[in-house]
Image: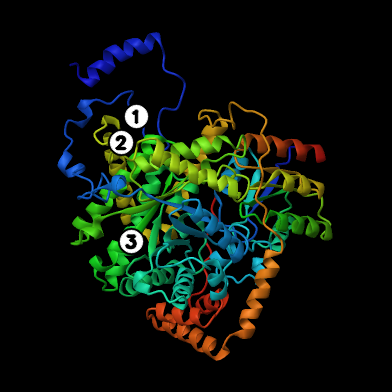
């Protein structure tokens, strides 16, 4: 049996239009052999979760640079629980202070990458975490 | 003296066989590969009169004013906005007290996208990356105690620019100011939103129409106002190269000029109030060259291609901001050094105003302390380094003049490509800019990932990151804002609101200038969301194709 490819949804929740990071990461993950779906801009939490479930992804990567991370991450974690889809790993990237990273990890967010994080770091994190869970 | 190529082929070659060059990407961020040295030979055909002339003279390569910083320093204009109008008003007053010479307003995302603070799409975003302004009432609080006739204010607002500008002018009128004496800038550059920042509401065509309404109405009613700041900043932040930033920004500017001419406006009436906004990134000389090239290209286009006669129409006046995207969350205090060097490049490039980023901006909105250090950094450049004593001090540098020429040349190649696609709006439609910028930013990231390009503290010289204080935004902002808006709605004259909104609808349906209706809406305390909803109905909303 061939190894199943890791499937990632890269998502931009809310009104934030800063998409450089999301697009760079989407390409980097794809080049690393993952299957990547990018939502495009202005997604509600519900839209993101619907896509994640429909596309049967292993992980959702949320890119938020607008400061609304304490709104969107908890909303998505809660909705995943309600839809019984907690097996989907949630990680993220953006302008997020350390204190907030700690509280987001407490509610089950896997990892948050801040400006300067390398693609390699993110790729390794995903490969390791998703493989471990299998 | 030996010719440059002989020296390179003999002396340099021999020396570098003994002492090899470092493994380092000497090419700059636009992929221009510099020679190891530049000499008199590189300027052999250089026509000083046509390429440089004097400052304040065509083609303005050396600056738009004759006296430049010897007469007046650049405007130190720090971008600020957070939380409620009250909070930002406090921050403004502190910045003015600290010696800042102009204001610059950051709005939150709901405002930028034309939603009121109480809209469901605004949840979690109110006051987060700027101040929330939903009606004239917020604007009045925001500028409480600040005189619009003496302090110029810049507002970073695009899709809803007409409405927000009208609110500012209504605020000034209510204070008794004469609009002919009120100065400032609205960003109002919608094309770069489609290209890079993505804060658009309506499709490109009606969006540009709204911009041209300000070109027509502004010079007649608010003659000291820059009704547009054509912006490369966001194009660069989205990952473009310096040359792409230069070319796409000037192409946008030209697109607005063509659109205004199509409406039958007189170029010498509107062009003098067109202003620009560029990024200042890490590559020092490339950035300086970019500013000089920008002025020269714009002057030549305005005079030679579009026939402007008024020298003020030829002048590219610009604001600059250090590169937010270059700031790192790792070892954040290093950002102070990055910002100082970038700020210095902006000044050596002859910028007319400058914002220096705060060192904590890779982590949060700036704290008061961090914003003050950033302002003080400009003051160090202005008062301690001596760079403001001599105008365009690097002119004639073999390398810099060469680089300025090269950037101009590459910019003109992009102009041809964009024209061949049918212009800026067509190029947006076919994803040209998205592809160009996407490729460039991915290449930069790969160079950093592979450590070909070193970012100190990120992929080399890594250290434990020291904790720094973080600016927090109170969660109560959303509630305070929503409450104020409902009070405004309860106390205003509903009939006046209805008739102003109807006038706006009619102006947009009939293709008339919308500014008088926006002014009436502002005075009637119609909310931003109400006004944008009218236009959403008439124009529809835009969604971009999803590309990675």
Asked if marks 2 and 3 touch (Cβ < 8 Å), the reply is no
Q: Dot 2 surroundings within 10 Å: few (below 14), some, or many (20 or more)?
A: many
**Nearest to N terminus: mark 1 or mark 3:** 1
Parent chain of label 1: B
> Under tag 3, what secondary structure?
strand
Q: Which mark is residue B114?
A: none
Q: In the rendered view of the protein, which quadrant contains the N terminus of chain A?
A: top right
Q: Do discs 1 and 3 belong to a common subunit?
A: yes
Q: Which mark is residue B274?
A: 3
Q: Residue at x 39, y 59 (%)?
A: B229
Q: Is residue B516 left or right of residue B541?
A: left
Q: Dot 3 surroundings within 10 Å: few (below 14), some, or many (20 or more)?
A: many
Q: Nearer the viewer, residue A134 or B196?
A: B196
Q: Is residue B429 left or right of residue A24?
A: left
Q: Which residue is mark 2?
A: B403
Q: Position of residue B524 (x, y in %)?
A: 52, 83
Label 2 to label 1: alpha-carbon separation? 9 Å
Q: Which residue is mark 1?
A: B34
Parent chain of label 2: B
Looking at the image, is B377 positioned above or below residue B5? Answer: below
**Nearest to N terminus: mark 2 or mark 3:** 3
Q: Say which quarter of the image contains residue B430.
A: bottom left
Q: Is residue B40 left or right of residue A91?
A: left
Label 1 to label 3: alpha-carbon separation? 33 Å
Q: Residue at x 61, y 37 (%)?
A: A119
Asked if marks 2 and 1 touch (Cβ < 8 Å), the reply is yes
Label 2 to label 3: alpha-carbon separation? 26 Å
Q: Position of residue B101 (x, y in %)?
A: 43, 54
Q: Position of residue B185 (x, y in %)?
A: 41, 62
């Amino acid at each position: 049996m061939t190894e199943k490819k890791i499937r990632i949804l890269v998502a931009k929740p809310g009104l934030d239009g800063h998409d450089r990071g999301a697009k760079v990461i989407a390409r980097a993950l794809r080049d690393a052999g993952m299957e990547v779906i990018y939502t495009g801009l202005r997604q509600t939490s519900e839209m993101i979760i619907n896509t994640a479930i429909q596309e049967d992804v292993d992980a959702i990567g949320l890119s938020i640079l607008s400061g609304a991370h304490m709104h969107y991450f908890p909303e998505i974690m809660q909705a995943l629980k309600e839809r019984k889809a907690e097996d989907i790993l949630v990680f993220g990237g953006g302008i997020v202070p350390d204190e907030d990273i700690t509280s987001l990890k407490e509610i089950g967010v896997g990892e948050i990458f801040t400006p300067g994080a390398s693609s390699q770091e993110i790729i390794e994190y995903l490969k390791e975490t998703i493989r471990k869970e299998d | 003296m030996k010719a440059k190529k002989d020296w390179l082929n003999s002396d340099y070659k021999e020396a570098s066989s003994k002492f090899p060059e470092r493994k380092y990407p000497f090419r700059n961020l636009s992929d221009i590969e510099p020679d190891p040295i530049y000499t008199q030979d590189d300027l052999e055909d250089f026509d000083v009169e046509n390429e440089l002339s004097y400052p304040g003279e065509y083609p303005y390569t050396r600056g738009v004013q004759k006296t430049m910083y010897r007469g007046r320093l650049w405007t130190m204009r720090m971008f600020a906005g957070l939380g409620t109008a009250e909070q930002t008003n406090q921050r403004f007053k502190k910045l003015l007290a600290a010696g800042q010479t102009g204001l610059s307003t950051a709005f939150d995302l709901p405002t930028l996208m034309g939603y009121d603070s109480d809209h469901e799409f605004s949840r979690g975003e109110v006051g987060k990356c700027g101040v929330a302004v939903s009606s004239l009432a917020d604007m009045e609080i925001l500028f409480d105690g600040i005189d619009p006739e003496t302090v110029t204010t810049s507002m970073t607002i695009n899709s809803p620019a007409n409405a927000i500008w009208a609110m500012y002018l209504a605020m000034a009128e209510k204070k008794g100011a004469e609009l002919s004496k009120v100065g400032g800038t609205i960003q109002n550059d919608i094309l770069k939103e489609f290209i890079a920042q993505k804060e658009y509401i309506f499709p490109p065509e009606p969006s540009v129409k709204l911009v041209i309404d300000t070109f027509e109405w502004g010079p007649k009613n608010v003659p000291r106002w820059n009704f547009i700041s054509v912006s490369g900043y966001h194009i660069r932040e989205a990952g473009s190269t310096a040359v792409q930033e230069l070319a796409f920004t000037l192409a946008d500017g030209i697109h607005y000029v063509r659109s205004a001419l199509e409406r039958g406006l007189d170029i010498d009436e509107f062009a003098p109030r067109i202003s620009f906004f560029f990024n200042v990134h890490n590559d020092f000389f490339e950035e300086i060259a970019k500013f000089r090239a920008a002025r020269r290209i714009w002057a030549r286009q305005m005079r030679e291609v579009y026939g402007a006669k008024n020298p003020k129409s030829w002048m590219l006046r610009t604001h600059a901001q250090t590169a937010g995207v270059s700031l790192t969350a790792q070892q954040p205090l290093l950002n102070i050094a990055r910002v100082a060097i970038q700020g210095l490049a902006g000044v050596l490039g002859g910028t007319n105003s400058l914002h220096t980023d705060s060192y904590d901006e890779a982590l949060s909105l700036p704290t008061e302390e961090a914003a003050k250090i950033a302002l003080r950094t400009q003051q160090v450049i202005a008062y301690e380094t001596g760079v403001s004593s001599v105008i365009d001090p690097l002119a004639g540098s073999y390398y810099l003049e060469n680089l300025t020429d090269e950037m101009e040349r590459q910019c003109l190649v992009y102009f041809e490509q964009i024209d061949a696609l049918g212009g800026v709006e067509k190029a947006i439609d076919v994803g040209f800019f998205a592809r160009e910028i996407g490729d460039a930013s991915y290449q930069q990231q790969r160079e950093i990932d592979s450590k070909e390009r070193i970012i100190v503290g990120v992929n080399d010289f890594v250290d434990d990151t020291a904790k720094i204080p973080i600016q927090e935004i109170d969660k109560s902002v959303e509630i305070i804002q929503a409450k104020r808006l409902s009070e405004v709605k309860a106390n205003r004259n509903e009939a006046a609101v209805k008739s102003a909104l109807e006038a706006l609808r009619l102006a947009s349906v009939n293709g008339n200038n919308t500014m008088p209706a926006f002014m009436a809406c502002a005075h009637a305390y119609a909310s931003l969301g109400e006004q944008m909803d009218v236009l959403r109905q008439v124009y529809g909303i835009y969604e971009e194709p999803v590309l990675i």
